[in-house]
Image (cartoon, rainbow, N blue to C red):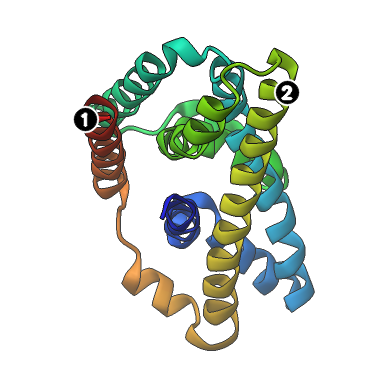
């Protein structure tokens, strides 16, 4: 179930135009080549993946503190909720994002994912996946537990990023090949509110499960 949540969050991030698939469409149209579209997807995927790892890996180290696991889960859930509320209250985009050249897609994708809290959405899911492994290894050596946690963090980030770029890439290809720019202009909608609400919901569900567990 939690792995389905990892994939679902990736698909959700992928269809969100704010994560960059329109830039891939733009690259394909400017060069009049589907290869340019595909080439633009790679830095978008790498940037998103690195952003996920940057957020998740510190929690991979915290998971080794088995006796504090419940408190860590509760703290992470509250952090996700707080960031979601912050996004609801302040919907303006960081000005620093506008200073990143369009040619630096990887850096742009990384910065956008961090600014929007995309990685935070994965943290409660990741901690849930680590819970059983951490409890089973509670009396094992610390380095074995760290290796397990880090491996899980990398796997979660990879699966999520793969789902994200698959969804975004398919949508970019459909727009480029069949739907055209009119579809983008007519269908473009602001996902800031739904994104913030999603963060709050994910955090609230994780908090409820942590308290109940």
> CA–CA distance between discs 2 and 1?
28 Å
Q: On the rendered structure, is 101 left or right of 78? A: right
Tell me the quarter of the image containing the C terminus: top left
SS at mark 1 in the image: helix
Location of residue 181 in the rendering, given as x and y in whole percent from the top left corner: 48, 76
SS at mark 2 in the image: helix
Q: How many labels does the image show?
A: 2
Front in this rendered view, residue 91 or 198: 198
Q: Residue furthest bottom?
A: 178
- On the image, numbered disc 1 is attached to which residue? 212
Position of residue 144 relative to residue 92, above or below, is above
- On the image, numbered disc 2 is attached to which residue? 144
Q: On the rendered structure, is 113 left or right of 141? A: left
Specify whether residue 113 is in view: yes
Tell me the quarter of the image containing the N terminus: bottom left
Location of residue 130 in the rendering, given as x and y in whole percent from the top left corner: 52, 33
């Amino acid at each position: 179930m939690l792995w389905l949540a990892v994939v679902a969050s990736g698909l959700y991030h992928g269809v969100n135009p704010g994560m960059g698939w329109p830039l891939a469409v733009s690259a394909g149209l400017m060069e009049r080549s589907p290869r340019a579209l595909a080439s633009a997807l790679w830095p978008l995927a790498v940037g998103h993946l690195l952003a996920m790892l940057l957020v998740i890996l510190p929690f991979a180290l915290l998971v080794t503190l088995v006796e504090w696991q419940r408190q860590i889960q509760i703290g992470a859930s509250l952090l996700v909720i707080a960031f979601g509320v912050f996004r609801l209250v302040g919907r303006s985009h960081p000005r620093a994002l506008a200073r990143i050249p369009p040619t630096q897609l990887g850096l742009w994708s990384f910065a956008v994912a961090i600014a929007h809290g995309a990685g935070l959405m994965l943290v409660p899911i990741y901690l849930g996946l680590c819970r059983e492994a951490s409890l089973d290894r509670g009396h094992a050596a610390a380095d074995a537990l760290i290796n397990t946690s880090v491996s899980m963090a990398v796997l979660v980030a990879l699966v999520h990023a793969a789902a994200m770029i698959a969804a975004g890439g398919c949508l970019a290809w459909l727009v480029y090949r069949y739907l055209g720019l009119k579809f983008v202009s007519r269908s473009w909608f602001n996902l800031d509110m739904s994104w913030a609400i999603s963060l709050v919901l994910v955090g609230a569900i994780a908090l409820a499960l942590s308290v109940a567990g």
